[in-house]
Image (tube, grey):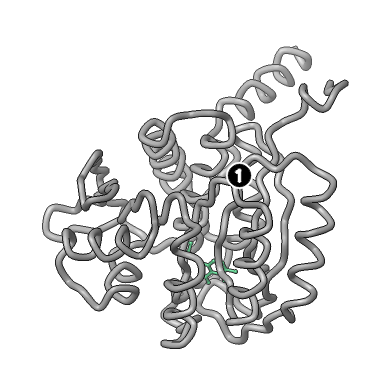
Amino acid sequence: MYTTLSDSPPIVLVFAGHDPTGGAGLTADTQALAQCGCHIAPIVTCVTAQNTHNVKALYPLPKAQIMAQAQYILEDMPIKVVKLGLLGSIEAVEAIAEILISWPDLPVIFDPVLAAGGGENLSSKQLISKIKKELFPLTTLLTPNRKEAENLTGEKNLEMIAKQLTDSGCEYVCVTDVKPMNRKVINILYTAPQQEIGGWHWSRLPYQYHGSGCTFAANLAGFIACGYPIIEAVYQAQRYTWFSLRQGFIAGQGQRLPNRITHCSSVKRVDAFIERDEN
Ligand code: PLP
């Protein structure tokens, strides 16, 4: 039981969208953060209409509503880390930039969601240029997949991508790439000046998943909020994400959803406890 503020779990302030499938967005972040012992303060940037096939509509919240949600929380809770997911509008970028400038010492983990897994575009040229100009200089660690990294930079070469993203102000960049030929998923961690400081590869699982990027970035934000060094947090979050995907399940008729809960040791401990009690 938590009795004092200093006993309480680390709190991560998340700006992201709501996804009614429960696979991505704030629900994914809530689960992935809980698994490393963190509490989420969820700030809604937009609401979506979607299913496991694709996103049908995106309804952004006005800047004033996004700012008010965050300000009120920041005045009250000791936030350890900020995580950014789907922003969905230029107003959201402006709101978040203003908030982060007013609370300048918070580490920012940014998953730059530009498209839905089903292919629907969730960004525009103007939104991308606003993100680069206003949010990258405030970003501690950016977690794009290869496609997002190419769209953000207009580059194809990973070294050039890393250079441009770190030159734009991101302190660290972790790019997730898929190598279909050898069935591997690769993560490479860079810091300025375009220096590779970590690389990991995982066997590629056979299905399409919705919410894998959110799972990775949120769990990573949680490990950083718990005090893990960046490289260790990046490794732990990949591991958590890979097991969540391996245990992924069929919820609808499209992409599978990660199982972010039942593969975890904490849940197994609860199961063991119930079994023991029943016997
Ligand atoms: N956040 C929301 C609210 C979404 O709707 C989506 C995709 O549809 C994402 C994030 C990104 O999902 P993924 O982690 O699969 O890239």
**What secondary structure is marked by label 1?**
strand
**Numbered disc total:** 1
Q: Residue at x 74, y 70 (%)?
A: 66
Foreground residue among 104 and 121: 104
Q: Residue at x 30, y 62 (%)?
A: 167
Foreground residue among 29 and 56: 29
Q: Which residue is drawn at 18% across and 64% down?
A: 160
Quarter of the image with the C terminus is top right
Q: Residue furthest left?
A: 181
Q: Which residue is drawn at 58% across and 82% down?
A: 90
In percent of width and height, residue 141 lies at: 43, 50
In percent of width and height, residue 37 lies at: 65, 32
Say which residue label 1 marks: 81
In the figure, is residue 68 to the left or right of 267? right
In the figure, is residue 260 to the left or right of 279? left
Q: Check disc 1 and give the amino acid type.
A: Val
In percent of width and height, residue 86 lies at: 56, 69
Position of residue 155 relative to residue 26, above or below, is below
In percent of width and height, residue 4 lies at: 85, 22
Res. 161 visible in picture? yes
Q: Is mark 1 within 8 Å of ligand 1?
A: no
Quadrant of residue 272 within the rendered picture = top right
In the figure, is residue 3 to the left or right of 143? right
Position of residue 247 relative to residue 57, above or below, is above
Res. 187 visible in picture? no
Disc 1 crowd, CA 10 A, few/some/many (<14, 14-19, 20+):
many
Quarter of the image with the N terminus is top right
